[in-house]
Amino acid sequence: MLEWSVNDNIWLKRTAILHQLAYKNKTDSGLLEIIICNCLGSDEFFINKAIGWALREYSKTEPEWVKTFINKYEGSLSSLSIKEAMKYII
């Protein structure tokens, strides 16, 4: 997944971002952070949407981790990614 996250193919990148989507408490947050960071700065809608989706799903299990991640990378995350990630965080 790390190799895919730095590939030029957006669909491989997107798959890398989303591969832990249903893992819940078994999500490797360190790996998730690295993969998302590898994709930051993209202007590709499907990449930014996937980042938000992955963070939103993980926020159902670890909302504090997601809040911390967003605060840490707020300047690099797209507004779409932040909007999607914060959907269930109050």
Image (cartoon, helix red, strand yellow):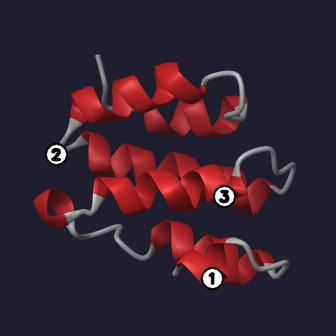
Return the x and y of residue 2 as percentages of the image width and height. Answer: 55, 76
Relative to 43, residue 67 above or below: above
Mark before the other along the chain sequence, 2 or 1:
1
Per the image, the residue denoted by label 2 is 61
Judged left or right of residue 71, residue 40 is right
> What mark, if any, has residue 89 been given in the picture?
none
State which quadrant residue 81 falls in.
Answer: top right
Amino acid of disc 2? Thr
Question: How far is disc 2 from disc 3 in space, using C-alphas?
Answer: 23 Å
Question: How far is disc 1 from disc 3 in space, using C-alphas?
Answer: 10 Å
**Image quarter of the C terminus:** top left
Amino acid of disc 3? Asn
> What mark, if any, has residue 3 been given in the picture?
1
Residue under the image location 67 percent in, 34 percent down: 77
Element type where label 1 sits in the image: helix
Residue under the image location 34 percent in, 71 percent down: 20
Judged left or right of residue 57, residue 4 is right
Residue under the image location 46 percent in, 37 percent down: 85
Per the image, the residue denoted by label 3 is 38
Return the x and y of residue 71 as percentages of the image width and height. Answer: 49, 19
Element type where label 3 sits in the image: helix
Q: Please report contact status of discs 1 and 3: CB closer than 8 Å, yes or no.
A: no
Relative to 80, residue 36 above or below: below
